[in-house]
Image (spheres, helix red, strand yellow):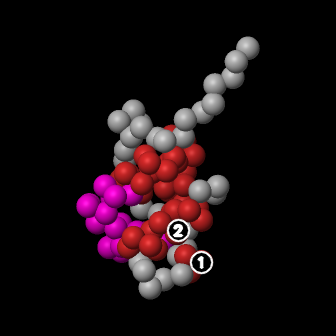
Amino acid sequence: MPYAQAIKEFVVEEFLPDVPPAELDADYDLLTNGVIDSLGLLKVIAWIEDRYGIDTDTVELRPESFHTVAAIDAFITHASPRPTKSV
């Protein structure tokens, strides 16, 4: 999970200020447990766009992609712009 640490740090900073990032389990359900609500989800999406250069208008946004740190990591991995190879 190449993005997990950055995601944990963001979630803790924005939504769980009293929790150290190391204590946030990658499989903890952020949506079901009320850590991130609908407005928080917009903040997460904006952060992903800014930090990783992902154009969320061109990728499918599904709620299950944002339930856990692991799911967000997988979303970023899948949606990240791939460098083009020149021949």
The image quadrant of residue 64 is: bottom left
Q: Give the extent of the magenta segment.
A: 28-44
Q: Residues within 10 Å of mark 1 (few under 14, many from 20)?
A: few
Is residue 41 a member of the stretch shown in magenta?
A: yes
> Residue lying farthest bottom?
18
List x then y, in percent, for residue 19: 48, 83
Please name the residue that numbered disc 2 is placed on.
Answer: 8
Quadrant of the frame with the N terminus: bottom right
Q: Cα distance, mark 1 to mark 2?
A: 8 Å
Residue at 46% x, 74% y is 12
Mark 1: which amino acid? Ala
**Residue 72 vs residue 44: left or right?**
right
Residue at 37% x, 44% y is 61
Q: Please name whichever residue, 86 or 62, is drawn nearer the observer in this view of the structure.
A: 86
Residue 27 shows up from this direction: no
Marks 1 and 2 in Cβ contact (< 8 Å)? yes
Q: Residues within 10 Å of mark 2 (few under 14, many from 20)?
A: many
The label on residue 22 is 1
Q: Is residue 72 above or below residue 16?
A: above
**Residue 17 vs residue 27: left or right?**
left
- Mark found first going from the N terminus, 1 or 2: 2
List x then y, in percent, for residue 47: 42, 54
Q: Secondary structure at mark 1?
A: helix
